[in-house]
Image: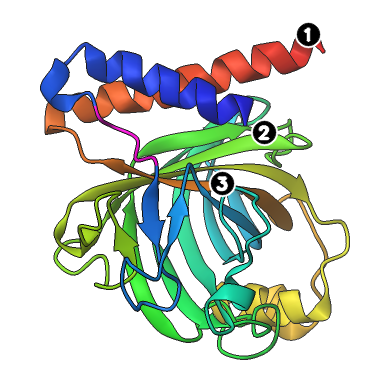
Amino acid sequence: MKLLKKLASAAAVSFAMMGAAHAEAVLNNWIFNPAGTGAAAGQTVNEYLDINGNAIIELAATSASTFSFTEHGVFNSVQADSNNALFPLNYGGKNITALFNATGSGTFGGGFSFTGGTISIYSGTYGVYGTQAGIYGADQGTLIATFDILAGGGGNVDASGSPINNGQVSVLAKASAPGGLTSGYFFAADGTDLSSTNLLSFAFTNANTIAAPTSTLVSEVGCQYAANAAACNGNFANTSTAFFVSNNGQFKLAEVPEPGSLALFGIAMLGAGVVSRKRASKV
């Protein structure tokens, strides 16, 4: 929570530099309806959707000190603002899942960043996530949003290229246009449908390596989604070039600034992360 407040403050400072016309960056008190039946029946989201998930990362050294990677992930969301007002209970059994695929590069024992990718969000039936339906149950139901991952974000890795224990990862994306958001699901605080609006999304998650991924995770995400050879052959084990991670964190929305302002938004994100890491190191 402190980190998100730090991020919002940093973003606000950056956008204040652009003038009052562009000061409203991060969306608060927006409305989300997992069932797609309109704003009146939706839930007010003060800050974020809670997300958790798993991903396989395939890594290739590009030099003695650098690497490139691809990531295929699946995510689940059953509530907003950690408020326990569960989507499955309040919206006819609906909860939110997502497919995530991305590319990037980094430095061993240093940082990494994303270069591109997509996030596809679905409204589906509760209880399907984590099964063999579709891809780990994460692509079942109605596709309600598609985001293109923007260059930047990322986090820190150890000397082998794995995310540092409980390391923070940030992702910045923009709603694909046209039709990036399906009408009936996402609304501004005043009830305006956001399906015709250009939006950014950003997420912060904590990443940890999964020592023993389940057979379902290996077959569904490792083989079906990522087409990893070892996963498809049934003899997968985490190595320095292919490993599974778990993630949990928050997903937020923001207005799209002018093109020249997007870099400042990224700087705000980075600054918030740096401050958080420094604070954590003092604990």
Specify how the rendered protein is coloured: rainbow
Please tell me how crowded label 3 is: few (under 14), some (14-19), or many (20+) other residues with Cα within 10 Å: many
Q: Which quadrant holds residue 220?
A: bottom right
| Marks 3/1: CA–CA distance | 24 Å
110 to the left or right of 280 = left
Residue pushed farthest bottom? 133
> Residue 157's x, y, as percent?
67, 33
Which type of secondary structure does the marked residue at label 2 adopt? Answer: loop
Q: Is residue 211 above or below residue 185?
A: above
* Amino acid type at image mark 2: Val
Q: In the depicted view, which residue is nearer to us: 103 or 172? A: 172
List the residue tagged with mark 2. Answer: 157
Disc number for residue 50: none
N-term-proximal mark, 2 vs 3: 2
Q: Which quadrant holds residue 264?
A: top left
Nearer to us: label 1 or label 2 = 1
* Amino acid type at image mark 1: Lys
Which type of secondary structure does the marked residue at label 1 adopt? Answer: helix
Which type of secondary structure does the marked residue at label 3 adopt? Answer: strand
Identity of the residue drawn at 60% across and 60% down: 79
* Amino acid type at image mark 3: Gln
Mark yes or no: residue 2 visible: yes
List the residue tagged with mark 1. Answer: 282
Disc number for residue 250: 3
154 to the left or right of 232 = left
Q: Is residue 44 above or below residue 13?
A: below
123 to the left or right of 263 = right
> Residue 187's x, y, as percent?
29, 58
Identity of the residue drawn at 21% across and 62% down: 193
